[in-house]
Amino acid sequence: MMPAFGNCIQCDDPSERKDAPVLSIGLPVRNGQDSIERCIHSILSQDFADYEIIVSDNASSDATRDILKRLAQDDSRLKLHFNDADIGILENMNRVLLLARGQFFRWISHDDWMEPGCITACIGALRARSDAVGVTTGFTIHTSEGSKRRENYQGEFPTSRDAACRFERMLWFFHAGDGKYDPVYGTYRRDILLHTRRHGPCERSDWLLCAELALLAPIIHLAAPLANRTRSYKPILDPKAIRRRLNPIHGERLRSTPLGLYRDLSSLVAETDPPAPQLRRFRSALRRFLIKEVIRTGRSSLSTAKHQIVHKAQSAFSAF
């Protein structure tokens, strides 16, 4: 059964020590030499000081480790961990969570950064709402080509005290574009995160985790753009390569299908054992999700096939 929010068993871990920080920031990285210093400096310059930065370097082959060691010499809040081999993105994200000690936790990517006051605003919002599992913020997207954009979405977020409403909103965001909502990089109560399925063996594990959190309790949203996210919009020529980044050994086992995601999401709902009227609302949201995901997957497959054909044609012409 999914644990009821507010009744989770406290884990017997290092966070029980009196010196545990309020916030743990998990920073998984592999080959981030060009951006990780900016990311860390954006954290160290915050006006909130009671945190630790848990860095898990995933067998980087560039200068990332040297940069991390230099930065750690100047600030003891930077906790470094080095993987001898590439364990994949998903397992590395889980690792920083398991190493964390803070009351609250958030992930950050090595090529992202925070705006001043981000941590203070998020911790303040969570302390003011004991019924909330986490808090998200507005964000600005930066591309590798140097452009940036921000969507000022004015609609409803998964903030309701009604679980079916939160779940429906979370599923809606999965197909609403990448600029409206970024829940996986919110700030959450760490003990609750530890009792979720975390990042499981699925290429859409972020969706499943966020849906699970939405089922548990309200997720506060702060509209201010307090975070910066980096995106690359290059055509996907090899989906298998992306899955290998998630898990180098068993990447193909992570491949998701619309029906598989529908079943996984249905399983999360079933664990909450909702009453019949609410269950009907959950099922309605799941059906809408399935239809949208079938359409999205079909379009994505066609786009990938088109780019592969163009790439092969260009390679053939360049050979002459």
Image: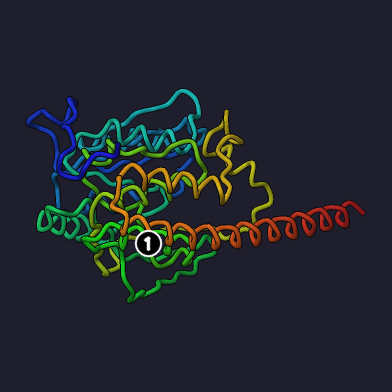
Answer whether residue 116 is visible to the viewer in this image: no
Measuring from the top left, give residue 146's x and y in whole percent: 50, 66
Asked whether 100 or 113 is in front, the reply is: 100
User: Is 211 positioned to the left or the right of 86 in the image?
Assistant: left
Is the residue 286 above or below the residue 202 in the image?
below
At a point 40% along the width and 73% down the height, the residue shown is 151
Measuring from the top left, give residue 270's x and y in whole percent: 36, 44
Which colour scheme appears in the figure?
rainbow
Measuring from the top left, give residue 252's x and y in whole percent: 61, 36
Bin the neighbour count of mark 1 within 10 Å (Cα to Cα): few under 14, some 14-19, many 20 and up: many
Q: Amino acid at mark 1?
A: Glu
Is the residue 250 above or below the residue 192 in the image?
above
User: Is 195 positioned to the left or the right of 35 in the image?
Assistant: left
User: Is 61 positioned to the left or the right of 6 in the image?
Assistant: right
At a point 19% along the width and 26% down the height, the residue shown is 13
| Residue furthest top in the image | 84
> Image quarter for residue 149?
bottom left
User: Is 174 positioned to the left or the right of 117 in the image?
Assistant: right
Q: Quadrant of the C terminus?
A: bottom right
Asked whether 155 or 182 is in front, the reply is: 155
At a point 7% along the width and 31% down the height, the residue shown is 18
Asked whether 252 or 281 is in front, the reply is: 281
| Callout 1: SS | helix
Is the residue 183 above or below the residue 1 in the image?
below
Q: List the residue tagged with mark 1.
A: 168
Asked whether 4 or 121 is in front, the reply is: 4
Q: Quadrant of the N terminus?
A: top left
At a point 71% along the width and 60% down the height, the residue shown is 302
> Image quarter for residue 294?
bottom right
Answer whether residue 307 is visible to the viewer in this image: yes
